[in-house]
Amino acid sequence: MTTDPFLQLIGQKQAIELLTQAVRQNRVAPAYLFVGPDGVGRSLAARCFIELLFSSFVAPQLISSIQNRLRQGNHPDLLWVQPTYQHQGQILTATEAAEKGLKRKAPPVIRLEQIRKITEFLSRPPLEAPRNLVVLEEAQTMAESAANALLKTLEEPGQATLILIAPSPESVLPTLVSRCQRIPFYRLDTQSLTQVLTQIGNQELLQHQAVLSIAAGSPGNAIASYKQLQEIPPELLQDLAKVPSSHRKALELAKKIDRDLDTEAQLWLVDYLQQSYWQECHEASIIKQLEQVRKFLLCYAQPRLVWECLLLSLCQNPPVRSY
């Protein structure tokens, strides 16, 4: 008797049931859209689903080999696609960019070249598994040209299944959504969140209320948030904990944020400041201003200018502390 791969996925009962039944009834769809917040288990669910699907068509003595190859990322019938950066003619994932020490000024995206690689991958029949599997993480980052190219593949996937992972159906082109079966994922309750963080050896995060507030029921976000907290200079967070005392101080802070933090860290800083300012003064206007900062950063606006506008505004109209 084999171990159920979904045992490691906590708090997503509906998704587990839908995917398990699809395999058991041999009714696997050509395309799925895993929708829900970041860090709640969507990617893990995709791995569990693939492991269950591939293992269901082999002799029991071969299952262990399949599991190992999937975990090592070298199964010939699986292609896992992540958003990338472009640097000196190379396409790099976020992990590869971090290993090279690159300062990233814009979020990574799924590129047309990557969609072409998917088309090439699916042009051949599966070598070992019953079908080819393609996973696209953060599918919402596809530019329109990439999404249109993917649409042609979704219309005729052949002997394959594609899994798109995104925060919501609205974040992906409607033409793509209409060709996918939706699998919903939800934020975890406190008990499940605690269970996950303890199970994976990150129980120290439970002592950081700011991190848990930012995570909002997402174990993955809690881990990523804690990591960002460790990497951002403490003196910068200390300076930002209060409103700049002068226009000069506001401009200096904006320059420091732009110089010291990449885009990913700046986006995390937006979340952190929203939590901090809300706890301090409960002013919705500041939260809205920070949402505008996030929007501008994601639209590739000049970061230093974005932060200058925010900090100068706070300097001129300081929030009133709530008691």
Image (cartoon, rainbow, N blue to C red):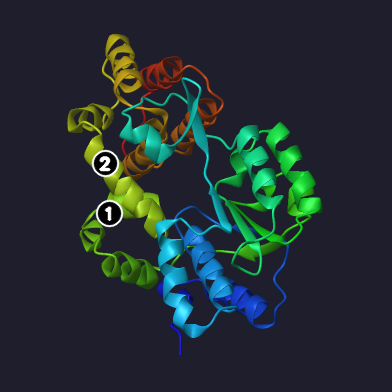
Q: CA distance from mark 2 to mark 1?
A: 12 Å
**Furthest residue to the front?**
127
Q: Residue at x 34, y 68 (%)?
A: 196
* Foreground of the two, 321 or 235: 235
Left or right: 148, with 20 as reference point: right
Residue 232, horizontal then vertical, whole percent: 25, 34
Can residue 100 be seen in this snapshot? yes
Q: Amino acid at mark 2?
A: Leu
Residue 279, horizontal then vertical, whole percent: 33, 45
* Foreground of the two, 87 or 285: 87
- Density class for disc 1 (Cα within 10 Å; few <14, some 14-19, many ≥20) is few
Q: Which mark is residue 209?
A: 1
Above or below residue 246? Residue 135 is below
Q: Residue at x 42, y 29 (%)?
A: 263
Q: Residue at x 34, y 48 (%)?
A: 224
Question: N-terminal of the two: label 2 or label 1?
Answer: 1
* Foreground of the two, 286 or 291: 291
Residue 240, horizontal then vertical, whole percent: 28, 29
- The answer to which quarter of the image holds residue 145 is top right
Q: Amino acid at mark 1?
A: Gln
To which residue does mark 2 refer?
A: 229
Can residue 9 be seen in this snapshot? no
Q: Does dot 1 land on a helix, a strand or a loop?
A: helix
Left or right: 4, with 140 as reference point: left
